[in-house]
Image: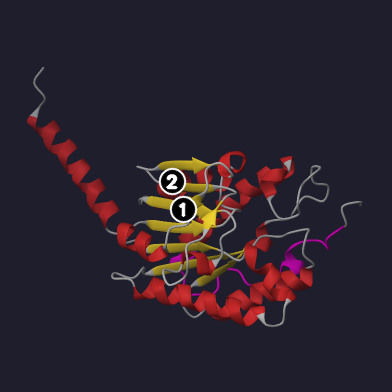
Amino acid sequence: MTIPRVGVFAVAASVLFCVQAWSEGGILMIGDSLSVGRVSKTLQPLLTRELGVKTRIVASCGSRPRDWNSKTSSYETSCGYDDLSATRSEEIPYRDALKQPHATPKLVKLLAQEKPETIIIQQGTNMFWDLQDARDPKRARAEIRALLDQVFSAKPAPKKCLWIAPPDTSKWPSEMEDRLFHLISEEVSSRCRVFDSRTVTRYPVKPSRGADGIHYDQTFLGRSQQDHWSEAIVAAVKALDAKSKMLIKESPRESHPPRRSHGS
């Protein structure tokens, strides 16, 4: 069967449009254990579909900002790893990670590979412990600044940046959650928008046995929270064109009822 010439031109134009649209700048996201698994598998196709650009998500369990910095030693995760895009599908779930440890890639290499217009950084979960030592907050601030220096030294540098601060927990007191959010905000907000994930999440009051108060995938109700969080992240990315420096900065205590103990 002979394909009409107009049809060939239409298909070629359609393919060319898609290639041009995707070459104009995609999304690169890095994350820690909270992005490994359900969240990255939900977000990658969701961002691609909703924003209409190529999206790559790399998540390394246990990681913190310094682990993505090219000037620091390599961090090998043994609790889970994802690298997902339209052409990549590398998934190492928690149950297999001890037997399949994986090095956390350096962000400068990922930026060089993807040349994204938008960078999303989901980090902070593994910095709560820093707040228990008076010396460590200074170190935490320094490693956030150092990572952002590398982001904006890339050529080309991303035009948009979103830092996703940790969601609600039941492990850490509200006061400590507030301190970490404000530490991140103070170091990040001049260069990136900051998304306070606590405003759209609430760790289940009665989690499943064995839940650690941090990871939502350990609870049945937590999985619906993960999906809601993913949708909120997409909305936050769409809002990056807004003029406001901060996407969400109101106190989460105003957005949620007072936290109850597990026994209530």
Q: Nearer the viewer, residue 127 or 46?
A: 127
Q: In this view, does 177 lie above or below 43?
A: below
- Report the predominant secondary structure element of the magenta stretch: loop
Q: Which of 157 and 136 is in front in this view?
A: 136
Place of residue 230 in the rendered image (x, y in percent of width and height, measured from the top left) = 57, 51
Residues tagged 2 and 1 counted as in contact (Cβ below 8 A): yes
Q: Name the residue under label 2.
A: 84
Place of residue 145 in the rendered image (x, y in percent of width and height, measured from the top left) = 50, 78
Q: Mark 1 points at which residue?
A: 58
Q: Residue furthest right?
A: 264
Number of other residues with Cα within 10 Å of mark 1, as a class: few under 14, some 14 to 19, many 20 or more: many
Place of residue 203 in the rendered image (x, y in percent of width and height, measured from the top left) = 74, 53
On the question of residue 261 being in view, the answer is: yes
Kind of residue at badge 2: Leu
User: Relative to 260, is 52 on the left or the right?
Assistant: left
Q: Which of 10 and 85 is in front in this view?
A: 85
- For the point 75% across and 72% down, the residue is 176
